[in-house]
Every structure is written in structure tokens, then in C-alpha cells.
Image: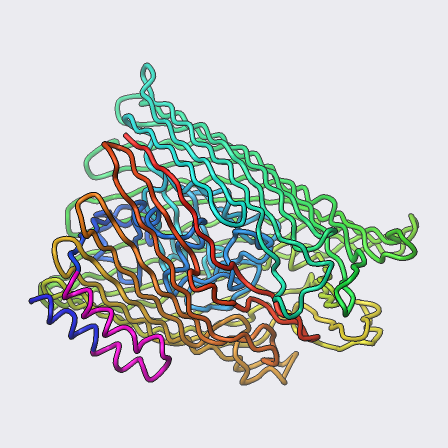
Amino acid sequence: MAGASGGLSVSYYAGRLSRVNPFFRALPALVFFAAARLEAQVVVLPSVFVTASRSDEAPDRVPFAHEVVAGDEIRATPAVSIDGALRGLPGFSLFRRTDSLVANPTTQGVSLRGLGPSGASRSLIILDGVPLNDPFGGWIFWSMVPRESLAAAELVPGGGGTAWGNAALGGVVQLLTEPVAGRRDRVLAEAGGLDTRAVELQVTQPVGPGTLQILARDFSTGGYSIVAPANRGPIDIPATSRSHWATVRWSEPVGGDAVVTVTARSFAESRGNGTPYQNNAARSAFASVDLRARPSEAFQWDAVAYLENQGFSSTFSSVNATRTAETPASNQFAVPTTAEGASWVGEWRPDADQRTTFGVDVRDARGETREDSSYVNGAFTRRRYAGGRQSDAGVFVLHTRDLGHGLRASAGVRADGWQDDDGHRRDLASGVEIDDFSYARQNGVAFSPSAGLVWSASRDWQVRAALQESFRRPTLNELYRPFRVGNVITDANPALQTEKNFGAELGTRWTRGIFTFEAAGFWNQLRDPVANVTIAEGPANVPGIGVVPAGGEARRRLNLDQVRVQGVALSARWEIAANLAGEAQYLLDDSEVREATVAPWLVGRRLAEVPRHSATLGLVWRPQQRITLSPRLRWVGAQFDDDRNTLRLAPATLFDLSVEIQVAAGWKIFVSGENLTNQLVQTGRSSDGTVNIGTPRLVMAGVRWSR
């Protein structure tokens, strides 16, 4: 097919979608402009996909929707952060509309296809086979993830629950670093607006019988005020961020068919959250051992054990109506957390037509929040200790085989036994104990079956269908820790039930010459989802919560009965000429509360933080051999910031661009810009009308060296 035909195909869909939002009206012109004047760069993606089944599999044999973003693509995006780069995919979103540049990490939970966003991620994030979700709260410390050393990011929205178990309710995102093998060195140095700068390096060097790899990053930004200019007062200062980490890995062959890799990582971060009093800090130490073996051509296995020790602290305040002063609301001075786990995964492949993957994994987490509250006459008068222990053990088996005539089937089942233990909450007032709760042990079993079909009807056309059931246990934070942000007070609930999701999807992919079009329809029934339900408005005295000031709200974590999330995902990719590649994606996400016995007023409401429409358009253009331009247009539709759909966040369109020039062998210089039109992106809205905003225009310049 000629380049013009590819443009016509994309333009047809863009024309249809232009009725939804003006963003799409620009799409046909952009595509035709590219087709007429640009030359393509063919992006080479990894040839195997591992996340859906925890074993190597060709991407065209995976029944669930999936996406692989190569490391070079991530590095080419204008975004400074990893989550910022992944937000270029409409199906990937964070609890808030802003990335981790300066946002509080407790708002960085991941939602795939809008499946119930919350600070506690409903999707499992994995770094080299080990969960990255915070053991206490479920959120993600994105600043811990290397960018220069990433080999790929694999996303499975709506899938992966059978292979991974707890927390993979909405899907799985796995971040894969480059292997500890051979010799590879990388260095990045960049600086730019908002007093932002970063240095990152990778050194991989054979030493004796093994290979040593050293990774490190130092990052800081002076940030920006997260309150909209119209609401800003003297108390508002820029939100800032500073982080650094170092990782050392050693890999060595052992025996005749095995390789052992040992990893140690240290991480520290501090953030200012927009006023003089509000800040947070985190630190962690991590170690893991990975042993892989291939005893025969038909059988291989991988065993991993890991241990993490983490600390976190955070302060919150209440700001007066004129934003001239703040009063401390809480001082979460320590959250000690430990997590340890292990897994063993085997793969039996007797021939090319069938494969069985099976394994077992265990995880144990302990955590406690220690915090002060009730600030009176210049001092905190109450102290709280709350936390507990969560344990989970699962076993799974997945089998795939060819059925002939281009048809491949997969089926699997997983069983997890979970237990919440040592749940407690102890409150002291002026040093005197007033409450001492010990919560009963809870345990249960969760099953996560899945099935799928992939039919290659022809060389150009493929159809796939998949079903899955998945689950998520509420985090220790949701179960045991009440919290206050400003005048909004949210109560914990140790009786929260397990969230469960039944999902189905039907998709197709059609490829002709330079053009690939994919479409998928998805449907999810989320049962017992945890929601922060508004139960009273201030001024009020709410049992179990206490005094709620005027203009404030009392919320409690409760299980709703049922939420339905359904929609359509469309994508088009094209390679117009030798030096141009482009991609357009659109997501229609219809999420609605269907049953809510505890809050019947929410029935028919949309889920908070889920836009109905979102889309992206990106190009990679090489006008000359040494020059690469990567423009990206992102549009996110309107959404609500509260469960009752009263606080609306306006739609936003953002334009990003990066320019990279290879100046010598191994040397590249680049300039990148996020939100170049300086669009004011609403990320939060409070009941008093105060609006929070996302990253303004941010231009960075830097140099990369690799060999």
C-alpha cells in the first residue's frame, strides 16, 4: 500500500473522531502533511513478550491487549519522568493528571483503561520481575525507576492476573532493564526550566567469570506552584523534588546451565508539596537474587527472592480561605515498612506448538504509620500508631497450544491464599491512651482463571478474544490509616472486602503494507471496589471521624457493590517513508457505578478521575540522518475529581516535542519540551473552588553518550 493510502486510512478514523473533540480535527492534516513532506524511521520492538504469561512469547500469540514500548522510544519522548513518558498511551493514567515530577507519591497509583483510579494502584507495576507497588499504600515511587537503562516497558491492560495474582486487578506494567551481560556504558546529563537537572549513568563491564553493572541517578527540580494562579496566595510556594539512587548488579554463570544475578539498590527522595509546612521523604534499601537455569531445550526455570526495607514520612496542613497562612493538620513522622518475597516459575515447551508455564510466589509485608494530629495551641495533641501485616501465596498454571488453521488457544488458573494479620490502631491524647484496637485476623482464597483465543485469519488480519477474573486486597493504608488533606478527612476501614474484577475483551489487528490498525472492545465488572465515599459535609461532628470544619468533608473507605467499566481502544500505526513513523491512539472509557448499597446516591455516577475520552498523536521524523524530531500531541477529556461528580476538571490539550542530534559516534545532544503551549492543566479541585494544576511549560537540554 502506498503512503497516501495509509494517510487516508488514518484520516478516515480521525474524521469520525473529530465529532468528539477538536483535537481530532487536526489529525488528518497532520497525517497528510507528514505523508507529503516527512521520511520515516522504522521502530524495532522486542521480538518477545514476557509479562502476560511470565515466559517468552511472540506478541502476535498473546490474546490480551498489550503494548511494548522499547527503551529507545521511552528515551526519545519529551517527558522527564518514566510515568510521564508512558502517559503518552491513552490507556495508561495516574490517579491525578500530573506525573511524578513534583506530585506527592501517594497520588501516583496507576490505572489502566480507567479501571477505578486511586492512590492505591489497581494495576501491578513490576521492575525486572519484582513488584514496585509500595507495600504499605500501593502507590509507585516512579523516581526509583532507571530511564537510560530501560530495555522496554510492557503493558497488559486487563490481563496478567492469572500469572501475577494480587494487585493485577486492572492489568500489569512491567519495566525491564537491560541485561547484565557484555559491555555497555551510558551517561545522561540534562538541565532546563524550573531549575531541573538530572545525571544518570550505567556501566556494564565483564569482570573475571561474571559481569558487573552499576546504575545511578541524581535528580532535582525547583518545581512550580501547584495551585492555579487565580487561587494562589502568599502561602503557596513551588513544589519541589530531589531524589537519588544507586544500583549494583552482579551476574555470573553457575554450573553448566544456570546464571545467578544479585542486585542491591539504595534509594532516597525528598519533596516539598507546595507550602512551607507540607513535605514528604522516602528511603529504601532493596536486595534480590535471581537464578535462571535451562536444563534442557524443552524446560527452563527462574527463581527470585527479594527483601526491601523502606521508610516514609509526610506532613499535611490546612490552609485558610485567603491562602495567607496554614495550620499543621498531621505529621506522619515515620512509616517503617518491610516486604519480602520469592517466586519460582518453570516453562515446559515440548514443541513449537504448545507451552505450559507454571509457578508459585509468596509475599509478606509489614507496615505501620506513626503520626501526630489535632494541632491545638501550637502543638499536636494526638498520636496514632496504625498498621498490620499482609501475606499472600499463590500457585498458577498457564497452557497455550496451536489448534490448527491459524487458531491458538490459552487457558490458565491461579489460586491465592491471603491473610491480613496484626491489624491495630492505637490513639493517644496528650500522652494518655484513649483507643487501642486490635483487629481480627482475616484470610481467604482468591481464584484468577483466564482463557483466550488468537485467530490469524490471514497474514494481514488477526482476531483475538480473552476472559479473565482478577483480584486485589486493600492495602494496609486503606485498612488501617485515617488521613486528612486540608479540611477533607478520610476514615480507614479494617473490614474492607477483597476487590474482584471479571473482564472480557474482543480485538482485531489489520496490517497492510506501511499501515497497522488495531481495535479492541472491553468490558469489566468490578465488584466490591474500594471508594472514598463522602458521608458528611462540615461543620459536623461525625462518629468515628470527629469534628469536620466548615467547608470540609468527611469521607470513609467503603466497598461499593458494582462498577462497570467498558469502552473501545483504537490505534493506528504507519511508516510513511524510510525515515518517518507515526502513531495515533484513542480511548473511549465509560465507567459507571451500577450498585452501591452503602451510598445509593452514587449509582449512575462516573468514577472519579476517569476521562470519558483521551487520545494521543505522535511522530518520529528524521529529516536528516543525524537529526530526529519526536512531536507528540496529547488530549485528555473532562473528568471529575470527586465521587459525586460535582468537581469537574476541564479537558486539556498538550503539545510536546523533542529534537535529538547525533554529533559523533556514541554522542547525542537533545532539546525537549513538555506542554510547550503552556496549557493550564487542572489536576484537582476542592469544594471551596481551589484548583490545582499540572506541569507548566518545561524545556530541557542535555547530552547522551553510549557505547
In the displayed structure image, the side of residue 488 where residue 375 appears, left or right: right
Give the answer, above or below, for where 447 lies relative to 622: below
- The answer to whether residue 13 is magenta is yes
Q: Position of residue 394 (x, y in %)?
A: 46, 50
- The answer to whether residue 543 is magenta is no
Residue 355 or residue 526, whichever sits in front? 526
In the displayed structure image, the side of residue 556 where residue 247 appears, left or right: left
Residue in the picture at 25% in, 43% down: 348
Residue in the picture at 79% in, 76% down: 538
Q: Position of residue 207 (x, y in %)?
A: 34, 17
Residue 62 or residue 625, whichever sits in front? 625
Q: Quadrant of the C terminus?
A: top left
Q: Quadrant of the N terminus?
A: bottom left
Q: In the image as oriented, which residue stretches furthest toward the left?
A: 1
Residue 512 or residue 467, whichever sits in front? 512
In the displayed structure image, the side of residue 695 where residue 352 appears, left or right: left
Q: Position of residue 153 (x, y in %)?
A: 35, 49
In the displayed structure image, the side of residue 199 where residue 444 appears, left or right: right
Counting every numbered tag in the picture gives 0
> Magenta stretch: dominant SS?
helix
Figure coloring: rainbow
Residue 369 or residue 30, whichever sits in front? 30
Residue in the picture at 29% in, 34% down: 667
Q: Which residues are magenta?
A: 12-37
